Image: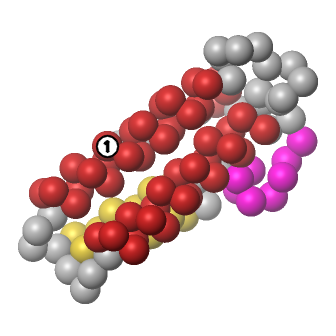
């Protein structure tokens, strides 16, 4: 699954109107959550779950508040999923 997020990359806090700033949260975090959920249920015999995040979540890029916050949520979700479901058979990871 791949989500193209180019249209909301620059949603800065002082220029974004509600509810437009919620787009990254709804799309990215919901898709990541359902992907991890489906993988945990269906990969009983092993496999890997890899979520991809933007470096904006870690670097603090100007005018990227919305996408950085959404992607930080994706990274947090993957860390929790690794603690919950990570095993020798089900590998988890997040690449930013």
Q: Residue at x 63, y 52 (%)?
A: 72
Residue 56: x %, y % from top left = 74, 50
Q: Position of residue 28 (x, y in %)?
A: 50, 38
* Residue at screen point 32% across, 76% down: 86
Q: Nearer the viewer, residue 4 or 70?
A: 70
Determine whether 35 is above or below 82 in the image.
Answer: above
Magenta-colored span: 55-62
Q: How many marks?
A: 1
Give the residue at the far bottom of this rendering.
88
Disc 1 marks which residue? 34
Residue 57: image x %, image y %?
71, 53
Q: Is residue 33 left or right of residue 9?
A: left
- Relative to 36, say whether 83 is above or below: below
Locate residue 91 relative to residue 53 in the image: left or right.
left
Q: Residue furthest left?
A: 45
Residue 92 seen anywhere in this rendered image of the structure: no
Quarter of image, res 87? bottom left
Residue at image location 58% in from the left, 24% down from the top? 23
């Amino acid at each position: 699954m791949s989500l193209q997020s180019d249209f909301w990359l620059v949603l800065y806090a002082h220029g974004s109107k509600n509810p437009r700033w919620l787009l990254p949260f709804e799309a990215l975090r919901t898709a990541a959550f359902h992907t991890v959920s489906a993988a945990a249920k269906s990969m009983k015999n092993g496999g890997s779950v890899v979520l991809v995040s933007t470096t904006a979540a870690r670097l603090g890029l100007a005018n990227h508040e919305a996408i950085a916050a959404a992607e930080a949520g994706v990274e947090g979700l993957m860390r929790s999923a690794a603690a919950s479901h990570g095993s020798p058979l089900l590998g988890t990871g997040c690449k930013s």
